[in-house]
Image (cartoon, rainbow, N blue to C red):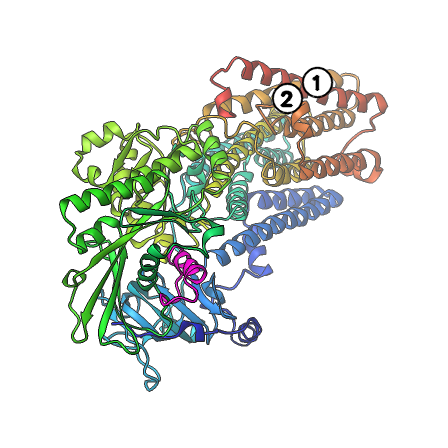
Amino acid sequence: MTHSIDFDAVKGLSYGEVSKRLAQEGYNELPQDQERGYLSLLLSLVQEPILLLLIGAGLVYFLLGDIQEALLLLLFVFIVIGITVYEEHKTERALSALRQLSSPRALVIRDNKRTRIPGREVVRGDFVLLTEGDRVPADARVLASTNLLVDEAILTGESIPVRKFPWDGKLESVRPGGEDQPFVFSGTLVVQGRGLAEVIATGPRTEFGKIGKTLGETKRRDTRLRQETARLVRDIALVGFAICIIIVVVFGLSRQDWLGGLLAGITLAMAILPEEFPVVLTVFLALGAWRIAKMHVLTREVSAIESLGAATVLCVDKTGTITENKMSVSAIVTDGLRCDISGKQTSTIPDYCHEVLEFAILASKKDPFDPMEQALHHLGRAGLAGTEHLHKDWVLVEEYPLSKELLAMSNVWRSPDGVDFVIAAKGAPEAIGDLCHLTKDETGKLHNHVLKLAEDGLRVIGIGKSYFRAGNLPAGQHDFSFKFLGLMGFADPVRPEVPDSVRECQSAGIRVIIITGDYPATAQRVALHIGLEGSDEIITGQELNDMREEDLLKKIDKVSIFARAVPEQKLRIVNALKGTQHIVAMTGDGVNDAPALKAADIGIAMGERGTDVAREAASLVLLNDDFSSIVKAVGMGRRIFDNLRKAVAYIVAIHIPIAGISLFPVLLGWPLILLPIHIVFLELIIDPACSIVFEAEEADPNVMKRPPRNKDEPLFHRNTLLLSFLQGGVILGILLLMYWFFSQSLTTEEARALTFSTLVVANLGLIIVNRSWTESLLKSIQRPNRALWYVIGAALFFLFLVLRIPTLRAVFKFGILDGMDIGLVLMTGIFAMVLFEAIKKVVYSRKSVIAPAFD
């Protein structure tokens, strides 16, 4: 049923009124769990193993009577807590921004303009436009509707959609459920038709809010990265705990100093425990999702970030993704004559084209949102002004919507003084030809005209007209006697940045496949324009229906265009690509796209024109419907994974010398080199280095010039670990050799200071070297990373204070180092960096099995 309304009379709320109502009633969202308070956060932090070990070490120093050392360790506890709170706050801010973006979108009328906003910003009194596939953002009364069916199962449990009729101004409220009601409710789903509704309740005042349910974030299984990290941390912790027990026993028995043994065990436990891994993973994925959102791509599932860098195929729509979705009428064909229209000729359309344009406008909405219908109205205002072909005073009587069975729609109109109904139809040329009952010869001519228009890259529709004596209208469009009027060709220009993005994909080893409902010739012309490889072979929707599965699997790697395809066929294409071991990214916007989006490794829903159903099925949402944003997101996904691997390699590498010089002195009978306070000092460098410096690292220049990585390739790749052990082993060897050599001529405190300072400088060198394994050290240093220099500057400054201020020097149990000692420390650190740079060049130049871990 249709209920007409003058959309021009609907002005909507002003933005000033919206601000007032937001201030008075709050956002359109249900109460959320409160953010953790400082006490709750503190309680969770003191349960962290590293802090428990620090507190334990402080207690040991109290028992030993070293109050100053104990207090300093407790001071470091507060510093570590401060760093952790900062990281959590930074992560939470990123997640909060993403939650706001992920709010279901709503199309509203405000200040006489249609605008799409996050559902949480809808206020009471807003006018919301609802279409098939939308999630209703708030409780509202229906003012106008066309075949509006809503699934209210989320509120009633009934899976059968209910019909909605416009509000008659009498009924004030009604409970969910039941046919022919004039109200729609927050959280329900529009499954058919469209409507205009006025919001009457938001947030906790909606029927959904009254039920008392709390909508929490969907609990998902941990990603493979998290599972892999958890296993590694668990295994290392168990091994470290066992070694620590052994060290305590060996130290206590051999030296008869059980408190010293406990201190040595705690130090070793702090050195071995890789507590940075969970923090790094959380920070990288949260901030990675935030960075991708800045590229207009919303991450709904964190696992998609892992998959992005592994994508081998991008399946995209043509209209609105590759093209601008800004239609303009480019050509009209009627009675065998063709009229080409440019921007300068819109006011001088030949008379023989007037009727075609007239009925094309009549077959459209009065206040259209569809780009093609907007183009028709624009051309009509320019080219038919002052003629009898515009009918603002005609009344729309009935609409026959487009269906799967018939790709055409018709509007039934009545003029103020007319007796008969006037029917205007538009749709796919073959569908209009079918309605007009064209002969075989006429159908052949129609096909030739369509083909010529399509070869020019135009999107083609057919136009028909009919008359019907007033009375009971028939059930379907086929019951009218239509006359074929002509064809209209629409131009939709390619987005200017798409050709470069396609070339970038192809250089990155990623195939681009166009799936479109347009004609093969149109799709092929667009493909040639953007430089798409493999555009010479095309499969149509009908050919796909007739094709056996084994034949499709044979051809799928050679075909880059699927034309005249319907959304339901996307699922078959996705499964065929996955069957040939591809990692598939698929775009979609409609309800029927949801299965394909769910089946794809990376489902990408359109944010501007996409339905809520498509967005809920997807793992990413493309906020601006722009193909180049997808390509940027793929590059960002590769960058995130690369930087995460660099951070992991660094963490493993630096823990090896720290653990080694905590363990070997016990085994060799040397005095302890590292104490808990030294480990804490190092952690204050390691923590921000791995979670801030590496996260902020720019992508390597060749990130989109290499093939996709294997999706099953683990983060802790054996080649990554091999390089980490090599780096850490070299540093450990240098430190042990240095301590052994200088302990014979220096005091224990001086040898400790020399060894520790060398470890700090080598640690900083390790950070610099691990920034890139594909660029030289000099090139990577030139790339900006402010966080790197902040960390290096702070580390060297505090090391200087520890070495020069007597009180701190005593707390760290250091001796005095002279200028030659400092020079030796710096030279040793530089030597380590040069050594690693040489190893990097050898590994990378020989293309060994180690290099791919960092390529």
Q: Quadrant of residue 512?
A: top left
Q: Is residue 120 left or right of residue 841?
A: left
Q: Is residue 520 left or right of residue 116?
A: left
Looking at the rendered structure, the secondary structure element under dot 2 is loop
Q: Is residue 2 above or below residue 490?
A: below
Choose the circle earlier in sequence order: 1 or 2: 2
User: In the image, residue 355 lies at what x, y percent?
Assistant: 32, 59
Q: Quadrant of residue 771?
A: top right
Distance between mark 1 and mark 2 Cα atoms: 16 Å
Q: Residue at x 77, y 28 (%)?
A: 749
Kindly identify which numbered label has been placed on residue 776.
Answer: 2
Q: Is residue 250 above or below residue 275?
A: above
Q: Quadrant of residue 358?
A: bottom left
User: In the image, residue 207 lies at what x, y percent?
Assistant: 36, 74
User: In the image, residue 798 lies at what x, y percent?
Assistant: 76, 38
Q: Is residue 375 magenta?
A: yes
Q: Is residue 775 magenta?
A: no
Q: Please state which amino acid type lies under the numbered disc 2.
A: Ser
Q: Nearer the viewer, residue 303 or 295?
A: 295
Q: Residue at x 18, y 55 (%)?
A: 436
- Label 1 with label 2: CB-CB less than 8 Å: no
In this view of the protein, can residue 464 be seen by the observer? yes
Q: Nearer the viewer, mark 1 or mark 2?
A: 2
Q: Is residue 827 left or right of residue 539?
A: right
Q: Is residue 23 left or right of residue 797?
A: left
The N terminus lies in which quarter of the figure? bottom left
Which residue in the structure is indicated by mark 1? 831
Q: Magenta residues?
A: 366-389
Task: Report crowding for label 2: few under 14, some 14 to 19, many 20 or more residues within 10 A (C-alpha).
Answer: some
Q: Please state which amino acid type lies under the numbered disc 1.
A: Phe
In this view of the protein, can residue 104 be seen by the observer? no
Q: Nearer the viewer, residue 454 or 185?
A: 454
